[in-house]
Amino acid sequence: MVIATYGALTGSKLLRAGAAQKMERFLTENEPGAGPVAGPALVQQGDADRIVDPSATAELVGRLCRKGVRVEYESYQGRDHNGVLMPSLPETLSWIAGRFAGDTAPSDCAS
């Protein structure tokens, strides 16, 4: 829906002059992993994702690992950005249940 509505807009038709500069600080502060992370993370992505490049996700996982965050990273073969939601649901629910049970979160980070 968003792409259908705004996909053809570029440059000055999409943003007012100066808008990008005003948003830069906001976008930088909201970059995942830019600030402290209070708990473990479950990161799931389809390897056919065209919205969030898998290499960007790999960089995020590395950044979180370097900060000492326990990160479990799962890639779903042949799934795109939205196509990963249903196949990952059982694992997501199990991961959350483990946190509520007090189990130590699994981590794919190198020790």
Image (cartoon, rainbow, N blue to C red):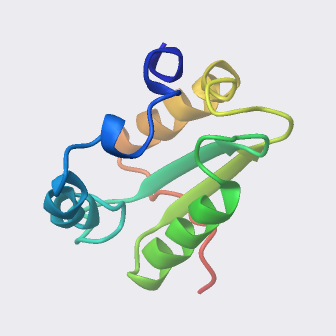
- Residue 63 sits above or below residue 24 on the image: below
Left or right of residue 45: residue 47: right
Residue 91: x, y in percent?
Answer: 62, 33
Q: Residue furthest right?
A: 78
Q: Quadrant of the C terminus?
A: bottom right
Q: Nearer the viewer, residue 3 or 74?
A: 3
Whether residue 40 is visible = yes
Whether residue 14 is visible = no
Task: Count every numbered label the image shows and give the total.
Answer: 0
Residue at image position (45%, 16%) is 5
Residue at image position (72%, 32%) is 80
Q: Nearer the viewer, residue 5 or 85?
A: 5
Left or right of residue 63: residue 38: left
Residue 37: x, y in percent?
Answer: 28, 66
Residue 24 placement: quadrant: bottom left
Q: Nearer the viewer, residue 15 or 3?
A: 15
- Residue 15 sits above or below residue 66 on the image: above
Residue at image position (35%, 48%) is 102
Left or right of residue 25: residue 32: right
